[in-house]
């Protein structure tokens, strides 16, 4: 959180890739502590910022955050919503990497299997 504070101080009140990444990482760590509601708050802010920065184009950072939101949402028990995030992550990763085998696609397929 100190890193987030510092990055926000350096970049001001604007969306910035470094801030989005830090929000994502805080969300990951917060989920590991078991505070899923707070983790989703950080992850969804990261997603909002990434989408603001990259627009409507498919982007690896957006796909990764969608994947993580899907995982955390599944932990809350909302499997239907989790599937929506994971499906969008999978679609985006397949769009980015095509029909080749890719570890990111495999990871999302694996998460998808846990939820369904």
Image: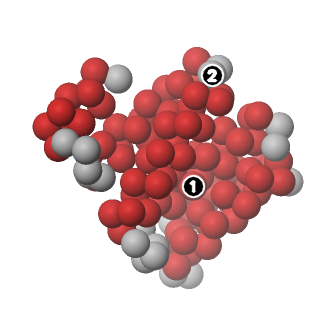
**Residue at image location 66% in from the left, 38% down from the top:** 72
The outermost residue toward the top is 33
Residue for badge 2:
35
Residue 66's disc is 1
Q: Secondary structure at mark 2?
A: loop
Quarter of the image holding residue 61? bottom left
Question: On the picture, is 39 further left or further right than 7?
Answer: right
Mark with earlier residue (2, 1):
2
**Residue at image location 24% in from the left, 36% down from the top:** 8
**Residue at image location 17% in from the left, 43% down from the top:** 11
**Label 2 Cα crowd, 10 Å radius (few <14 / some 14-19 / many 20+):** some
The picture places residue 45, in percent across and down from the top left corner, at 47, 45
Tell how many labels.
2
Residue 96 drawn above or below residue 82: below
Q: Nearer the viewer, residue 59 or 110?
A: 59
**Label 1 Cα crowd, 10 Å radius (few <14 / some 14-19 / many 20+):** many
Question: On the picture, is 45 further left or further right than 107?
Answer: left
**Residue at image location 75% in from the left, 42% down from the top:** 74
Give me the C-alpha separation between circle 2 and circle 1.
Answer: 18 Å
The picture places residue 116, in percent across and down from the top left corner, at 85, 54
The outermost residue toward the left is 10
The picture places residue 88, in percent across and down from the top left corner, at 63, 66
Q: Quadrant of the N terminus?
A: top left
The picture places residue 95, in percent across and down from the top left corner, at 52, 79
Q: Secondary structure at mark 1?
A: helix
Residue 25's disc is none
The outermost residue toward the front is 13
Residue 41 drawn above or below residue 68: above
């Amino acid at each position: 959180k100190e890193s987030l504070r510092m990055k926000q101080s350096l970049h001001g009140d604007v969306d910035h890739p470094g801030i989005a990444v830090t929000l994502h990482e805080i969300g990951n760590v917060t989920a590991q502590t078991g505070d899923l509601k707070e983790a989703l708050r950080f992850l969804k802010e990261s997603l909002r910022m990434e989408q603001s920065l990259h627009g409507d184009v498919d982007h690896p950072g957006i796909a990764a955050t969608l994947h993580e939101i899907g995982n955390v949402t599944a932990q809350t028990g909302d499997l239907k919503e989790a599937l929506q995030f994971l499906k969008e992550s999978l679609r985006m990763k397949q769009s980015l990497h095509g029909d080749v085998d890719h570890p990111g696609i495999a990871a999302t397929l694996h998460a998808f299997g846990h939820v369904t």
